[in-house]
Image (cartoon, rainbow, N blue to C red):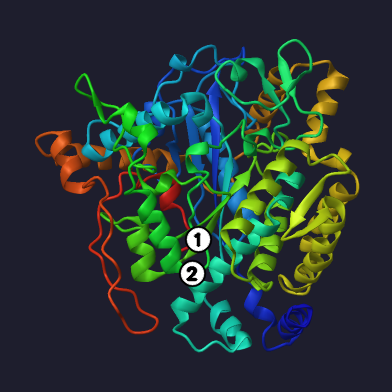
Amino acid sequence: MKQSWQNTLESFSRSQYSAALNGIRRGIEKESLRVNGDSSLASTAHPVSLGSPLTHQWITTDYAEALMEFITPVDTNAKKSLGTLADIHRHVYHHIGEELLWPLSMPCTIAAEEDITLARYGNSDVGKTKTIYRQGLKNRYGSMMQSIAGVHYNFSMPDHFWPVWQQIKDDKQPLQDFISESYLALTRNFLRFGWLVPYLFGASPVVDSSFLTHTRSTLPLENIGRSSHYLPHATSLRMSKLGYNTQAQDNLAISYNSLPAFISGLRQATSQPNPVFEKIGVMRHGEYQQLNTNTLQIEGELYAPIRPKRVTRPGERLSDALQTRGVQYVEVRSLDVNPYAETGIDLEQIYFLDIFLTYCLLKESPAFSWQQQCTAKKNMQQVATCGRDVSVILQDGERPRSLKKWGEELFSDLSEVARLLGKPAQSMKYQKALHHQHQKLKDPAKTPSARILKDMAEQKLEINELALNLAKKHRHTLLKTNYTQVRSCEFAREALVSRSKQRELEKSKPANINDYLRLTLDVFPPAPKPEKVLRGQYCHIPPRLCPNKASHESTCCA
């Protein structure tokens, strides 16, 4: 195993292969609640002047009307991606008056779940379906959990990388099959080693007391101030069982060992009736309560720290797209919003993620048993709740290991990847980013979760008071600086175009939403078994319209 890893490093060190790692493609999706100056949830509608959240390419909403989602186009330039994200924030601030963008993953002060208005997408059938889906999320998991925000990082390698990697691996299968297999290998390694992400970037060790009135969590939270609760060594309560998590999916045995296995598991979850959700029912008093009573209403409901993805065409489910055209990129979903960055993520985080995901791709990645997958999830939970405890022990297969020793081994390998990334003159940016993250492993006090607790103590602030101060600071910084990547007139044009697209959708609706759901969703019946096909091919299953063809399934590394 070690020799194979060394062979990989040596291969990419050769002049004929060194350029293959250049040109990593990334897209960023960042969520933020709109809040009032007293840290309460904004009750206003999504501003009309920003365009239609259903069809806008950069600015949309996620679960709630007040939960905004910002989407960057795919780019190979990290600084440009971050600049675009800053421009989106900047533009939004010009259109939300005195409201602020909440800089934390865990929600602001929310007195009652009824204060959370589901996102509205107009009167088109696809728009209504998206709202019904969110009604289902509300009935299944509660609105408070759905108001938690995060950052999704979409990652893919450049086209010229794959023939080189396939040659190094001496792989003879069709190229797209090799690409899909490689992204699934990356996914398995991310599940193995991904506990490092909440350790380094977790920024939600504290929650406001209003959040706890709507949860049944048994985590032993402690008081810290008048209205804040925390775990002393937590890194990311968002990634804990208190946060964006659900027991309903704990037993979903979705395999990442092959693309057919992943597709099969995903389809089974969207066709398998769930007795708990059957009690909710689909209709009540003539109103839809959810799209169906299956474990997943749609495939996008799968909660996972990372997902293999492919851009879907109109009228196509993700599983169909993966089956017919293979994996195109991966979506990392375990990042907390960075409260100290105006955009919720900074450049060094991007560089580190590039290193880490490239490592997960290049490192040997044996098949994952269900037990190993469960162990990896437990590691993630343990780091989320007590990762800054220097004595914490994780499980590496059947071997217990200290977080610090395991982390040091990972950083040793990551340093080799950092050396390879970018042109020789640019590799220092990766090595510098890696060095700064390594300091957090050596000293937990340098993690963002520790910094939040320190700032609260030194400034004698509650968590929401600290967040408000940061939000105001970010607003001031963004509004006093100029657009760098997307001009104001381009945002104005996109708003007009998005509203026009929504009107066109609303003109072409059938007689009623019931007919639309029957025709397009078909309650996601079990998919037919794949036919026997030639090696490297998949049988074609007619695509079905996915009601979640929205923000975070339209951003990709295409």
Between 476 and 529, the residue placed more toward the observer is 529
- As helix, strand or loop, the secondary structure at mark 2 comes to loop
Q: Is residue 158 visible?
A: no
In this rendering, position of residue 242 left or right of residue 407:
left
Q: Residue furthest left?
A: 511
Residue nearer the viewer, 302 or 435: 302
Q: Which mark is residue 479?
A: none
Residue count near mark 1 (Cα–Cα under 10 Å), binned few <14, some 14–19, many ≥20 = many
Quick one: 247 or 329, which is closer to the camera? 247
Find numbered disc 1 in the image and state the secondary structure of the residue it sits on. loop
Residue that badge 2 annotates = 258
Asked whether residue 73 appears in the rendered view, the answer is yes
Q: Is residue 558 left or right of residue 394?
A: left
Quarter of image, res 7 = bottom right
Q: Is residue 462 above or below residue 161?
A: above
Please tell me whether residue 366 is drawn above or below residue 312 in the rendered image: below
x%, y% of residue 233? Answer: 81, 34
Q: Are marks 2 and 1 in contact (CB under 8 Å)?
A: yes
Q: Which residue is mark 1?
A: 255
Percent from the top left, x then y, of residue 203? Answer: 72, 36
* Amino acid type for the residue under numbered disc 1: Ser
* Quadrant of the drawing holding the N terminus: bottom right
Image quadrant in which the C terminus is located: bottom left
Picture coordinates of residue 196, whole percent (x, y): 74, 51
Q: CA distance from mark 2 to mark 1?
A: 7 Å
Q: Callout 2, which amino acid?
A: Ser
- Residue at 59% x, 89% y is 170
The correct choice, above or below, for 535 with respect to 468 in the image is below
In the visual, does 411 lie left or right of 110?
A: right
